[in-house]
Image (cartoon, helix red, strand yellow):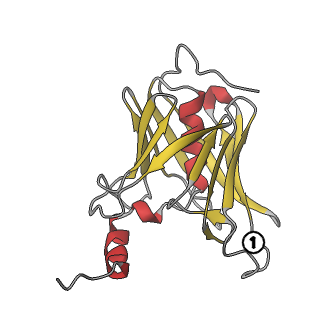
C-alpha cells in the first residue's frame, strides 16, 4: 500500500521512543502522536562474528500509519551504518549523501533527497546525543530524555513545523542507524585512514 503525504501537516507535538531488546531484535518503539504505534528495529547478530562481511544489514520501520521505510548498509552487530547506505521509503529509493571530509557537524550532515524534498540530518551540540532532521518549514529534533533505573534513556522526539508521514518515517528510521560517521570526531579518524600525498 502506498502512502500519500498529508495535504495539511500536523502542527508541533512531542513523543517518546523507548529502547527494546529481545532475543532476535533490537530497536525502539513508541506512539508517534496522532500517527500511532511505531517500531524501528534491526535483527541482532545472535552469535558475534557469524554475520557475513559482505552482506548489507537492514534497519526497518514498522507502523500502521507511516510509510514502509528501510535502510541497507554495511555495519556491525546487525545495525547498518551511514556510508554507502541505501534508503527505501514507500518502495522508492531516496538519495543519501554526506561529506566524509567535513570537519564540523554541519559539514558532515547527511543529505536526503526524496520525491522532490531535500532533508538534512545532523548532530547538534550537547551531551544528549541530539540529532535533527530538517527541510524548509520543518525540523524534527531527537534527544535523550528521562531515564528509568537500569534502562537506557528514552528518546524524546520534538516536531516543529508542519510534518507528514514521510518526514516522521525518515526521522524514526534514522534512530536505529549507526550515525557515528556524521560526528566531527570521526573526521580525525577518517583522516588517518586516507592515503597521504608526498608530492
Q: Could you tell me if residue 154 is visible in this image?
A: no
Residue shown at 70% from the left, 40% from the top: 38
Farthest residue, direction top: 7
- Compared across the picture, whether 144 is left or right of 87 comes to left
Q: Where is residue 198 drawn, in percent x and y?
A: 20, 86
Quarter of the picture holding the C terminus: bottom left
- Compared across the picture, whether 154 is left or right of 25 comes to left
Vertical order, 92 against 130 (above or below): above
Residue shown at 43% from the left, 58% from the top: 128
Is 80 in front, or is 144?
A: 80
- Compared across the picture, whether 185 is left or right of 33 comes to left
Q: Could you tell me if residue 157 is visible in this image?
A: yes
Number of dots carrying numbers:
1
Is 167 in front, or is 53?
A: 53
Vertical order, 98 against 32 (above or below): below
Q: Where is residue 67 drawn, in percent x and y?
A: 67, 33
Q: Where is residue 151 drawn, in percent x and y?
A: 64, 64
Residue annotated with mark 1? 45
Disc 1 residue crowd, few under 14, some 14–19, many 20+, Cα 10 Å: some
Farthest residue, direction left: 199
Farthest residue, direction front: 199
Vertical order, 159 against 57 (above or below): above
Quarter of the picture holding the N terminus: top right
Quadrant in the rendering for residue 65:
top right
Farthest residue, direction right: 23
Q: Secondary structure at mark 1?
A: loop
Residue shown at 54% from the left, 41% from the top: 94
Amino acid at each position: 500500500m502506498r502512502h500519500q503525504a498529508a495535504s495539511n501537516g500536523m502542527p508541533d507535538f512531542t513523543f517518546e521512543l523507548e529502547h527494546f531488546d529481545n532475543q532476535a531484535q533490537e530497536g525502539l518503539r513508541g506512539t508517534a502522536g496522532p500517527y500511532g504505534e511505531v517500531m524501528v528495529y534491526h535483527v541482532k547478530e545472535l552469535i558475534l562474528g557469524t554475520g557475513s562481511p559482505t552482506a548489507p544489514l537492514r534497519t526497518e520501520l514498522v507502523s500502521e500509519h507511516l510509510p514502509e521505510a528501510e535502510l541497507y548498509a554495511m555495519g556491525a552487530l546487525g545495525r547498518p551504518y551511514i556510508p554507502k547506505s541505501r534508503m527505501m521509503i514507500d518502495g522508492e529509493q531516496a538519495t543519501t549523501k554526506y561529506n566524509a571530509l567535513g570537519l564540523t557537524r554541519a559539514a558532515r550532515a547527511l543529505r536526503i533527497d526524496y520525491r522532490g524534498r531535500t532533508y538534512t540530518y545532523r548532530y547538534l551540540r550537547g551531551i544528549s546525543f541530539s540529532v535533527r532532521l530538517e527541510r524548509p518549514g520543518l525540523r524534527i529534533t531527537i534527544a535523550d530524555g528521562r531515564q528509568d533505573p537500569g534502562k537506557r534513556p528514552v528518546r524524546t522526539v520534538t516536531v516543529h513545523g508542519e510534518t507528514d508521514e514521510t518526514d516522521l518515517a525518515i526521522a524514526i528510521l534514522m534512530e536505529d542507524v549507526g550515525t557515528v560517521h556524521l560526528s566531527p570526531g570521526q573526521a580525525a579518524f577518517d583522516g588517518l585512514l586516507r592515503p597521504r600525498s608526498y608530492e
